[in-house]
Amino acid sequence: MERERNSLNQQFDYQLAFLLFLLFCTSIIAIYGAQLTATQYETNFVVRQFIYYILGCGIVASVMFFDSEQLQRLTWYLYGFGIFLLLLLKVAPESIAPTIKGAKSWFDLGFISIQPSEFVKTFVILAISSVLIQHQQSHQQKSIGSDLFLLVKIGAVSGFPLILIMQQDLGTSLVLIAITAGMILVSGISWKIITIVYSSIALVGITLLYLALRQQELISAVLGTKQYQMARIYSWLDPEQYPSAEGFHLLNSMKAIGSGQIFGKGLGNSDVRIPENHTDFIFSVIGEQFGFVGTSVVISLFFLLIYHLIKVAMETNEPFNSFICAGVISMFVFHVLQNAGMTVGILPITGIPLPFISYGGSSLMGSMMAIGLVFGIRYHHRTYMFSDR
């Protein structure tokens, strides 16, 4: 019994747990600093974030005990459950799923609000990983035809929830696209096909951006985008034209980060007002109050996290686990780049939170579910005789 306990103790990923602890400390400090500058809220966001982290740790502890075989058996049930929740949002009454900015994306249960799309991202990672494994088993000999068939299957698995989420939240839709794109890169599909497909997608993206500037009504009719979503693109390209509307967040975010200079103004000291700065614009708070040094520390923490996830992906002996890691890495990399990029004007504002740091229950617990899969991969890692690892 003692030997078994020691073995399990060695399998727990303490390095990943320590990185999460550092991100937790960063989140609490940053939200506390944001809360000191915003007097319009009566809610103590620090306490609530602490509670969300406790719940998130419970999710990690639950998820990590499922090995790869159990996860593969549960994958399609979880995927189906996620689709069910997204469909339920569309027909649920306003008392349960209120319409916010013309879209239903939250279940308001009174004591807690839940955004299903945050959990669907992890379900899609599992589903694509399962598709890749099943395809490898049934197509031992690769060909152009089999690669195209795999690409269609991946597109179908991610496309259905993407269509549903696109009507609710543009930011989460982009995350799903990033997850799919990242997992296609490691799927084994021929690079010739990938190059053609990605070049075509880039061409379509440029065309859509051009039409968004020239034919706004056409884009809204075809993609079903809301006016506020389009306004974010316009304010990104020319924020000075929207100083009191969508451009207000971007202009003040850049002003806040720039005014922080090297060492920042200190915890709780802020001269620039940014609404909801404890959520999507928490990076701006860190930049203003802790300066370039503070933002560099945060970026370094995420760099170490991604490095560790890559290390886990390379060390695992099971392809299914490697695909899961690829999906989780793609999700977090996009989250960090998009969130940090939008606060300094490099990328448009999409409402994507900074993982593990921004305030938010669904976002945090969704991220914890994804990271719980990585804990499980390390926890159930097997070392085989004559292995060179």
Image (spheres, rainbow, N blue to C red):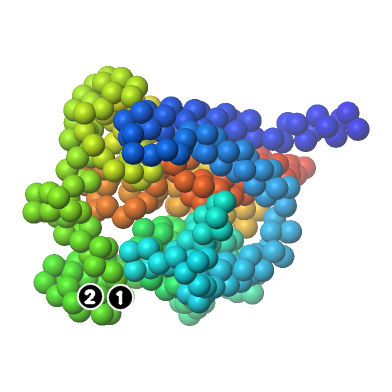
Amino acid at the residue labelled 2: Ile
Residue bearing the label numbered 2: 219
Q: Residues within 10 Å of mark 1 (few under 14, many from 20)?
A: few
For residue 248, side relative to residue 201 (left or right): left
Measuring from the top left, give residue 15's x and y in whole percent.
59, 30
- Kindly identify the residue that appears in the image at 22 percent across and 64 percent down: 230
> SS for tag 1?
helix
Measuring from the top left, give residue 97's x and y in whole percent.
49, 66
Q: Are marks 2 and 1 in contact (CB under 8 Å)?
A: yes
Q: Between residue 290 and residue 123, name the one nearer to us.
A: 290
- Kindly identify the residue that appears in the image at 26 percent across and 27 percent down: 270
Amino acid at the residue labelled 1: Leu
Q: Quadrant of residue 79?
A: bottom right
Q: Residues within 10 Å of mark 2 (few under 14, many from 20)?
A: some
Measuring from the top left, give residue 5's x and y in whole percent.
83, 32
Quadrant the N terminus occupies = top right
**Residue 208 visible in the snapshot:** yes
* Labelled disc at residue 223: 1
Residue 1 drawn above or below residue 312: above
What is the CA distance from the residue labelled 2 to the residue labelled 1?
6 Å
Measuring from the top left, give residue 96's x and y in whole percent.
52, 65
For residue 215, side relative to residue 155 (left or right): left
